[in-house]
Structures are given as structure tokens and as C-alpha cells.
Amino acid sequence: ESYWKERARWIMYEEKLEEETDSWSKPHVPCLSFRCLLEVQRAINNGAVLFDLKETTMSGISVHIVEEMIAKDQIRAQMRITVLNTLLLKHRHQFDENVSGHQDIETKLKEDHQSKRHSEIMDKVPENTEATLVLVGCVETMASPAMAFVRLEQAVHLESVLGIPIPTRFIAVFLGPSTSNLDYHEIGRSLSTLMADKVFRQVAYEAKSRSDLLTGIREVLDYSIVISPTEVHDEELLRSVIPFQHEMLLNRKKKIDKKLGKTPVPLQIAIMKTTPPEDDDPLKRTGRPFGGLIRDIKRRYPKYLSDIKDALNTQCLAAIIFIYFAALTPAITFGGLLEEKTNGNMGVSELIVSTAIQGIIFCLIGAQPLLILGFSGPLLVFEEAYFNFCETLGADYLAGRVWVGIWMIIIVVVLVAFEGSFLVRFISRFTQEIFSILISLIFIYETFNKLFKIFKAHPLTEHYNTSVSGPSVSGLDLPPQPNTALLSLVLMFGTFFIAIFLRQLKTSQFLPGTIRRVIGDFGVPIAIFSMVLVDFFIKTFTQKLNVPDGLQVTNYQNRTWFIHPTKGIPIWMIPASVVPAMLVFILIFMESQITTLIVSKPDRKMVKGSGFHLDLLLIVLMGGIGALFGVPWLSAATVRTVTHCNALTVMSKSVPPGHKPQIQEVKEQRITGFIVAILIGLSLLIGKVLRNIPLAVLFGIFLYMGVTSLNGIQLFDRLLLLFIPPKYHPDLSYVRKVRTRRMHIFTIIQLLCIVILWVINKSAFSLAFPFVLILTVPLRMFVLSRIFSPVEMKSLDGDEVEATFDEQAGKDVYDEIPMPS
């Protein structure tokens, strides 16, 4: 029995039905032969073309097609019945097959599967979609090929013709004998590809004559690529096709815009700049004292009620659970390391209290409540440098922080008054990547430095004195313990490799996507929990995290929750604290404002706006007041914030196969961050559990943060290119547009900046490293801009990072973030 068999479909890209497995192939860009496109052009020129046919059934349409073919002398009148019967044959789609009565169960299973597949396809098809039916095949009794192209007046549902219930607007038919030396299947693919092209499809909708269709085909041919019939031994040789196609598409778009009379892009930008909306650019200066702050309040606070209502969603509940662990893990990790760096003056308790209280206040008052406040690597480096500075002077570290906090408040008030947040625009990729590489190197160095100290305190010897016992917080005042160093090594690298593996699993092809993402998102907590269990079951001494019970401070013997401002510091240190205040303010300013810039990108489709001035004032004000209570300063944590935004992003389900999901909306609200902050505060109640975490596990997380922070940093990639021959360099913009020698010079300049900052950080002047870091901004603006051309600077220092929502293989949110985590 003859029938029409579905062989391929185009929702956007081509998908072939694999006959062996009866499944659809991956979406791909169709490759066509030039001859087939010419055959389609010739067929439309000579074939039957019907516009705005008023028929609603396949039988009525088929009759008109046959009669028009006869009128055009494509077929003889005697072939009328044969061709008509061919057009009216039954259609068989995926999973359709004849089954006998005893196969009822199998039939039902296939019907259920088919229904599910149809539902999945319909989710990917945009609303108001209309179909094109392309029928090609051999009819041996025909003398020569015949072709018909039909546009219906209204799209109609043709019963049992399509595999999914969408209306059909166009029908193309190409029939002929097998002796014609034509590949009918390839011609059908060519017809389908033409109709999948949005420009030609628009021509088909508006065409009034055959010549309009032929003009549309010629325009498609003008921008199609022909590859010479040369044998290709390496797929890399075909990569040059991609930039050439991009150039062709750009030229095509320019031609269409010109035809439609659109304003050229440069002129559009000029017009937009002359009359921008009032809240179009939150960093635009008003010229009035506190004008930016007032504009932030007017823009954001009228939407306060919707910030509550928009949280009534199950996606927000899932985000709360995920972000709680994402925020608690670094709080514990940095808290343990902060205790080490400050000799117990601040630790896990202080950091958890600071994160909870400041997070609650910020979510209630802040302009961008999706920001997650937290401690970070740069602040840890500064706290260590300032502690060492105070130790050298013999001054009280916590009292000195109080005056630093007071000066920070004065600085931020002055900056906000003069609308200084616009300065963040001058912090380019050049400075951000130097900063990020430096912090990553410090993370990695400190990890192995701590491990070295453990091996020094507990060296590997043949005999150990195990008669001495007793609790020890640091573990360094005990005699050498057996296996302590080796177990610490195992715990550190075990935590690191588990976290890395689970992160890679998230972007791999193993397991279903939902399970893979859940495991990957909770990779760090899983790594910590796994290694804590290993330590628990191995009865060997390891240094543990020091967490007091309840709301006690870490070093409760020597301090309280209130810090006396003048205790233990010389009078001259009060005005002199303005210098370290400026330095730590630079770090908070850079991290918080760049984080806000990242989440405010247009492709994230935030609709309620951000408030650079209000948020900066609030973060620094809370940090300054918090210094009176001896808690750490916080800033907007980049990775945690981007992850929070991603967790609240709703992606469109109507995505054609092969296309990236588009953002439908973002749940911009205050409740998720508010509840997460409360839960972090309540985590103080599990102090007994936290005391079981070995510090070596936290060192593993520290190493993990250092290594993963290198991802997506162009500078790190260019450093690797120094050791790779040019012929093996990847096909990237900064490789194509910048000569190799010039690219290496730019890389070496950045590397020298990192070396200088490293030397300063390890010297007696380590406190000044933020100031030296900010000097890279004028270096880039006034020196490098004269050494390198504008094209080179745009390629090497341009912000071309796309927002990451649906992780691709080997990529996640770290690839989007040039700042250290």
C-alpha cells in the first residue's frame, strides 16, 4: 500500500527522521546542493502557482492542483486520476504503523508516547504558527516532473495530514518519474528550507505573482554559501565558513533595513541619546546633589507592593532552598578562614550574624533586592592586611575597624551626593581580570600554605608520642599527631575534586537535565558533607572549625558584641583611618557596582530597574555601623547574585529545537533574599554540627573557588596562548583581529601588573594593594589606548560576555563573571 511518509521537519532548523531508530535527529542548519535550489527556481518558473486558494480540505486543494498542472501542460489529462489519488494518499508520521489486534497494549503505549511527544513539540512551537506541507515523490507513469505551489487564503487544519495540530497555509508538491535524474527528496529539502527562511517566508505571504517568488529565491541565492568540491581532511578547515556567513547575514540585514527605510544604526543611537527616558540609564548624572539617589528611590519604591506579590510562586520557594545553601557555604568557609587570618577576632559567628542582619535590612530597603550580600576573597585579603598592619603598630584591630567604618560612611555619602557611581563605567575588563587573577592566585597560594603549616606541625615520622592528650582549638600546640597531615591532604583534595566533578557533571550529558542541575547546584555542600563523613569515621585528629554556641562571639574571652571605639588605638589613628577606609571602599565599590551592572544587562530583561546609588549607600552604611559590633564588611557577592537571578528566571517553553531558550520573565521580588537571610541567621543554632567540619575541608573549598574563578577570564586564556603555537590558536575575536605579537604584549602588560600587585600584597605595604589596583584604570585609559588601536582595544578589552542562563557543555555562571568570587 502506498502512503506519504514523513521524512523531515523544520520548526526552525532541520530535523531528519532516522528510519533505524524512528527518532528525530538533532536540529541542524540544512546543507543544500546548489543544483537543487536551481531546480526549485526552474520548477516555480514553469509550474503551477496558486495564490489565496479558498479551499478548506485536502481533496478540494488537490483537485485545484491537478487542474492547474494540466493547464500548465505539466501533466496530461489522462494522468488526472493518478496524480489526484497520489495526492490523497494517507499520511504516516512517527510512531504510526499498522498493528494487529493482539498488540493492544503495545499500541496503547505507543499512543501515549505519541501524545507526549506531540505535547512536547507544541510547547516548542510559537503561538499563531502556520505550517507548510511539502510533498515530494515518484510517480512512474508521469512523463516528466511537475510542481505546484499553493498559498491558501486562510490557514486550515487538514485532517490526518500533519503530525501535530497546527493549521496549514502553504502546500508545495513536486512529483515525477524516477527516470528524470532528479533527487526529489533533496528538492523537497530545498523547498522546505526556503519556507523556513523568515525573509523568503515573508515574500511568500505577500507575493502577488510568480515573479515575486522568483525574486525571493534569487535573494536567498545571493546570500547562500557555496563550498567548493574539495576534499576536507579536518573539520577545523570549515570553521572559516562561520564568520563568512555572519558577514553575509549582516549584509542581508543592512539591505532589508535600507529597503524598509529604517534609520541607520549610528543615527538611531544619536536620536536615542538626545531624548532618553528619565530612568533609561540609572548611572546618568542629574547634576543635582543626591539626584541619583532620589531617582533610585522614585524608580524602585513605587513597585514595592509588586515585590511582595511576585514572590507568590513555587519557583521562588525552590530558589530559597538553593540560595540558602549557596550563601551559607561561603559564610562558613570564609568565616573559618577569617578566624585564621585575624587570630580569632572574627569568625563564623560574626560572619553569619553580619550576613543575616545586613541581608534582611537590604532586602527590605534596597533598590535591587536580588543582590545577595556576602563576604568575598578581596575583603578577606584586606582584613588580613589590615590585621597585620594593626599588629605591627600594636593597635587594637577591632577598634581600628570602627574608625575605618566611620570614614567609609563619610566617603560613601560624599560619593553618592556627587553621583559618583558612574565611575564604575571606567573599570574595564582590563582591571577586572587583573583583580580576578590576583585573587585566584591568592586563594590557591593560601590553600597550599595552610596545608604546608599542617605538615610542619604534624610531620610524617616513624614514631609518634601519643601519650599527650587534650583539646586544642588550633591543633598547632599539640605534639605531632599520627596521620593528621595525610588525612588533611585527603580531605582538602577530596573536597576539591568532588566539588569540581559535580560542577562539571552539571554541564555534561550524563543523567537527565533536572537531576544533573540539582546535583551540580548543590555540589559544594555535597562535597563538604562527604568529606566530613570521611573525617568522622576515621579516628584521627584534624583541626576543626571553631563555632561558639548560640550568639556568642568567636573569641568570647577577649571581646564582646560591642567594640569600644577608642580602646587600644593611638589618637592619630582616628584621622589616619581615612586611608584604609578609602582602600576597602574601593573593593566594596568595585564588587557591588560591577555585580549590579551584570544583573542589569538588557538581555536579562529586568523590568523594575536597579539603584546603583541607593544600594551602594546602604551596603557601606550597614558595613560602617556593623564595625561597631565587630562584624565583617560585606559587598554584593557576584556569583551568588547571578545564581540567585538565574534561579528566579522563567524561560520560555516555546523554543524551536536548536534555539536557545528566551527569557519570559524574572521574578523580581524581595521575599527570597529576605527568607534566605533569616535562615542563615538561624544557622547559628547548628553550631554543634558546624564544629565537626575540619578546616582542611574549607581549604578544599578555598582551592575550588580559586580554580573556578579562572573560568571565563580572557586574560587566563591568553596566558595559555603564550605557550601555544599560533596555528593552534582558537578562532576567537581577539585572536582574529589582533596580531599575535600585539596580543602577547597586552597579555604581558597585564601579567606585570599582577606581579606588582602580588609583591605589594606580600610586603609590608599590603594594605595599599586596592589603591595600586585602581591605578590600572588610568593606565588602561591614558597609556594603553595610545599603544593599541581602537579595534585592538575593543577586541582585548571589550565586554562581550553573554548572560548565562541555560548552561552549555563546559560553561556555567563563572564564565560570565570577570570578578573574583
Image (cartoon, rainbow, N blue to C red):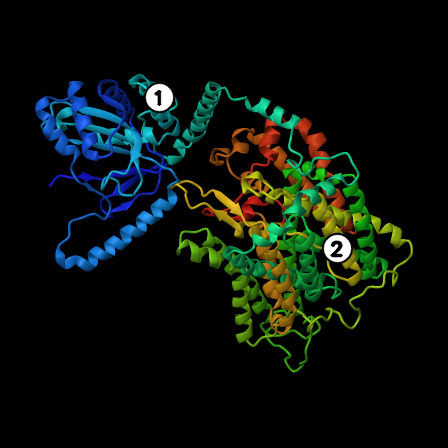
Residue 118 visible to an observer of this rendering: yes
717 is higher (above) or lower (below) than 211: below
Asked if the residues shown at circle 2 and circle 1 are in contact, with their CB atoms under 8 angstroms apart, the answer is no
* Label drawn at residue 710: none
66 is higher (above) or lower (below) than 600: above
811 is higher (above) or lower (below) than 288: below
The amino acid type found where label 1 is placed reads Gly
Residue 251 vs residue 64, the one in the foreground: 64
Residue 708 visible to an observer of this rendering: no
Coordinates of residue 20 in the picture (x, y in percent): 22, 46
Q: Position of 599 compared to 357: left or right?
A: left
Coordinates of residue 19 in the picture (x, y in percent): 22, 44
Q: Secondary structure at mark 2?
A: helix
Residue highlighted by disc 1:
216
Residue highlighted by disc 2:
623
Q: Position of 57 compared to 206: left or right?
A: left
Residue 72 vs residue 690, the one in the foreground: 72
Q: Position of 182 compared to 812: left or right?
A: left
Q: Secondary structure at mark 1?
A: helix
Q: Residue furthest bottom?
A: 467
Q: Quadrant of the N terminus?
A: top left
Coordinates of residue 207 in the picture (x, y in percent): 34, 21
> Callout 2 environment at 10 Å: few (<14), some (14 to 19), or many (20+)?
many
Earlier-in-chain disc, 2 versus 1: 1
The residues bearing labels 2 and 1 have C-alpha atoms spaced at a distance of 64 Å
Q: Which residue is depicted at the point 53% across and 71% down? A: 533
Q: Which residue is depicted at the point 38% across and 46% down? A: 123
The amino acid type found where label 2 is placed reads Gly
Coordinates of residue 818 in the picture (x, y in percent): 60, 44
Residue 303 vs residue 354, the one in the foreground: 303
